[in-house]
Amino acid sequence: MTKEEVLRLCDHTLLRTDAGFDEIAENCRLALRFGCASICLPPAYVYEAKKLLGDRLKVCTVVGFPNGYNDTATKVFEARRLIEEGADEIDAVINISWAVSGLYDTVADELAELRKATGGSVLKVIVESCRLPEAVLRAVCHVVSRAGADFIKSSTGFAERGATVRDIAIMRAECAAETKIKAAGGISSFADAERLIAAGADRLGTSRLVKLMCAGEGKLK
């Protein structure tokens, strides 16, 4: 794959808590310039990003982030409100505690509510794969697929580690064919990206690939 082809699969991500508006705006412009799939940014900046970008680039944001233990009503409110603000794609964290406790029906009920709340917008479900035993990850893949989510996403990028090739291969093996896979967290090179795509990732969540492109031009380190 060319670098341009890889970048078209990227949600260029800026979720640091200390990122100011000028940095958010600059990264919106960079994501647009490099042809990324979307810009993924904090909820508080969705409205401003949509005003800046219009329909030229998808705006992605996060719900229940990064821990996933907000109650369902709060996540549903967040999702609806952010779509009203202009978000095109919602990346929502599951309740990890419910998953590791085997409360799969409860996880499914929450995802059904989120699917209703997001309507025709893209819903990506973050499962934080590094915190799930393999048997739980496999079970959760089926829950996410049955819920009708557009994507299952490996990681928040705020946990001990991000996506691995094995995580993505498991997700691809266990999810329904129509459920796409987003690998996120720790993707530090185009070689990393290509390995994850080869394992089954349809989308990547990363901040570093755009930075690498800019660093090559001497404009951003």
Image: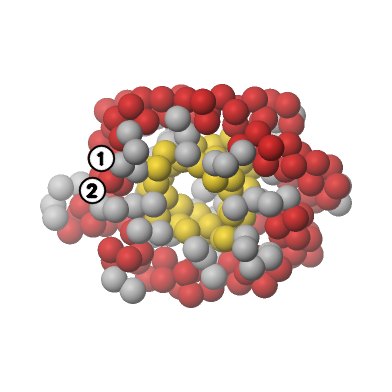
Amino acid on which the number 1 mark rests in the picture: Arg
Image check: 207 left or right of 184?
left
Residue occupied by mark 1: 29
x, y percent for residue 22: 27, 28
Q: Tell me the SS state at disc 2.
A: helix
Q: Residue at x 37, y 31 (%)?
A: 50
Viewer-nearest residue: 21 or 75: 75
Spatial distance from mark 1 to mark 2, Cα to Cα?
A: 6 Å
Viewer-nearest residue: 158 or 87: 87
Other-residue count near label 1 (Cα within 10 Å), few / some / many at <14 / 14–19 / ≥20: some
Q: How many marks?
A: 2
Instruction: Say which mark, if any, is on residue 33.
Output: 2
Q: Is residue 66 above or below residue 71?
A: below
Amino acid on which the number 2 mark rests in the picture: Arg
Q: Residue at x 72, y 43 (%)?
A: 111
Q: Are marks 1 and 2 in contact (CB under 8 Å)?
A: yes
x, y percent for residue 120: 57, 42
Whether residue 167 is visible to the viewer of this picture, yes or no, is no
Image check: 3 left or right of 113?
left
Whether residue 196 is visible to the viewer of this picture, yes or no, is yes
Q: Quadrant of residue 154?
A: bottom right
Q: Is residue 66 above or below residue 85?
A: below
Q: Residue at x 34, y 38 (%)?
A: 55
Q: Tell me the SS state at disc 1.
A: helix
